[in-house]
């Protein structure tokens, strides 16, 4: 019993850390007023999306979070979650945009220009705009709060209350 709970606790701790990292990246994007056209915007947004999304992978090891972390009463949170997972799978992690159900025409914009006799280009992913940052942040905050409640309950199951723990 304890081994199963300890594995669940580890999963929740790793997920909490990932959510916190994604939240920090979003804060950094907002505080520095990064624009979609700036070179750091897309890799930072990729970090947000893949870091959040990895908690829902069915990979080996600790595995994904329990399915109730993919259930939401608030339709806005549900929509944000579904969009993040889709963006992770179709755009950021695999760039498999052509082979997905929700084929997103125009998800990439490629700027091409001539400079000093050289043909230069910059691909820009335009899927996650600034307008969606507050929705993503709300989702991550919500996930962290309910994850913390879950973690507290699981920790209570393995802590020996008869022992004195020092901080």
Image: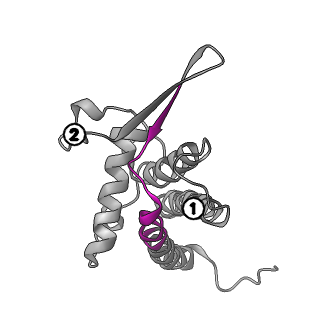
Res. 157 visible in picture:
yes
Label 1 belongs to which residue? Answer: 26
The x and y percentages for residue 161 are: 64, 85
In the picture as drawn, the residue positioned furthest to the top comes out as 117
Q: Is 90 displayed left or right of 17 in the figure?
A: left
Pick whichever of labels 1 and 2 is earlier in the sequence: 1
> Of the numbered discs in the image, which one, if any, rests on residue 76?
none
- Closer to us: 148 or 103: 103
Report if residue 8 lies within the magenta region.
no
Lateral position of residue 112 relative to residue 70, left or right: right
Q: Which quarter of the rendering shows the C terminus? A: bottom right
Residue 137 on the magenta segment? yes
Residue drawn at x 38%, y 37% as measured from the top left: 108
Which element is circle 2 on?
A: loop
Along the line of sight, the residue nearer the viewer: 11 or 78: 78
Left or right: where does residue 27 sit relative to residue 8?
Answer: right
- Quickly name the residue at label 2: 103
The foreground one among 72 and 23 is 23
Task: Write down the quadrant of residue 132 in the picture.
Answer: bottom left
In the rendered structure, which segment of residues is drawn in magenta?
121-139
> Based on the displayed image, in which of its 4 quarters is residue 156 positioned?
bottom right
Residue 72: x and y in percent read: 29, 73
Q: Label 1 vs label 2: CA separation?
A: 26 Å
Image point (42%, 48%), residue name: 63
């Amino acid at each position: 019993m304890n081994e199963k709970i300890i594995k669940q606790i580890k999963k929740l701790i790793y997920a909490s850390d990932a959510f916190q990292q994604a939240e920090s990246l979003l804060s950094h994007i907002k505080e520095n007023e990064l624009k979609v056209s700036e070179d750091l915007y897309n890799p930072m947004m990729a970090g947000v999306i893949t870091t959040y999304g990895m908690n829902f992978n069915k990979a080996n090891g600790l595995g994904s979070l329990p399915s109730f972390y993919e259930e939401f009463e608030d339709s806005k949170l549900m929509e944000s979650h579904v969009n993040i997972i889709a963006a992770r799978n179709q755009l950021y992690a695999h760039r498999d945009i052509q082979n997905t159900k929700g084929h997103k025409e125009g998800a990439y914009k490629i700027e091409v220009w001539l400079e000093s006799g050289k043909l230069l280009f910059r691909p820009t992913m335009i899927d996650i705009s600034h307008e969606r940052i507050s929705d993503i942040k709300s989702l991550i905050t919500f996930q962290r709060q309910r994850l913390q409640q879950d973690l507290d309950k699981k920790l209570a199951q393995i802590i020996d209350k008869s022992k004195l723990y020092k901080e």
